[in-house]
Amino acid sequence: MQDCTKCKSFMQAYNLSEDHKPHLEAEKERILKAGGYVQCGRVNGSLNLARAIGDMELKQNKSLPAEKQIVTANPDINTVELCDDDDFLILACDGIWDCMSSQQLVDFVQEQLNTESKLSVVCERVFDKCLAPSAGGEGCDNMTMILVKFKKPCDFGPSTKEHTLPSDQQSETDQNPAEPESK
């Protein structure tokens, strides 16, 4: 994730979404109206996010539509226009974002992409860093990450560079231009 104000050696992280945490007012209001509660920053004391694709046990109220359940999969949708300086997009779950800030992750991914072309290897290195930030190597959350590298636009138009023929193919006048005639 990066915006269009990138400097030559620095990428700026640009958040395309906001985490749907249970303590946020709009999320908390929906949770409470659906019969749930927020305890210690968790839905019903267990789940630390308020929107998810799974967690079906928190979506069982048959009198409520999907978007009004204790936990909903209803997304917020943002439209962002890409620019030529955008290099990559990171989609990741809270198992990543709870370990690294957006800027830390962008910096780490960019550093890895300088030496590694396989995106799957870069993702594995992110997982390793999040799983074992200290020598203890203890991690407890699942981790999912999709890394999308953007191709740079190609210039298919006519070249603006001047082409020079090899010396053996140049005409005599090209090798010895005539002196302008004096009047």
Image (cartoon, helix red, strand yellow):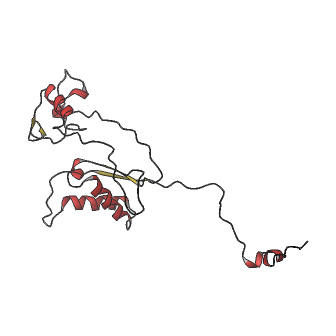
Q: Position of residue 114 (x, y in %)?
A: 38, 66
Q: Residue furthest front?
A: 183
Q: Is residue 90 left or right of residue 36?
A: right
Q: Position of residue 90 (x, y in %)?
A: 34, 51
Count numbered badges in the picture.
0
Q: Is residue 115 left or right of residue 171?
A: left
Q: Position of residue 108 (x, y in %)?
A: 30, 61
Residue ID at (17%, 51%): 141
12 or 130: nearer the viewer:
12
Q: Position of residue 102 (x, y in %)?
A: 28, 52
Q: Residue furthest top?
A: 63
Residue ID at (68%, 66%): 162
Q: Is residue 174 left or right of residue 34?
A: right
Q: Is residue 85 above or below residue 163?
A: above
Residue ID at (41%, 53%): 5
23 or 44: nearer the viewer:
23
180 or 117: nearer the viewer:
180
Q: Quadrant of residue 99?
A: bottom left
Q: Is residue 103 above or below residue 17?
A: below
Q: Which image quadrant: the C terminus?
A: bottom right
Q: Is residue 118 above or below residue 96?
A: below
Residue ID at (66%, 57%): 158
Q: Is residue 10 above or below residue 75?
A: below
Q: Quadrant of residue 168?
A: bottom right
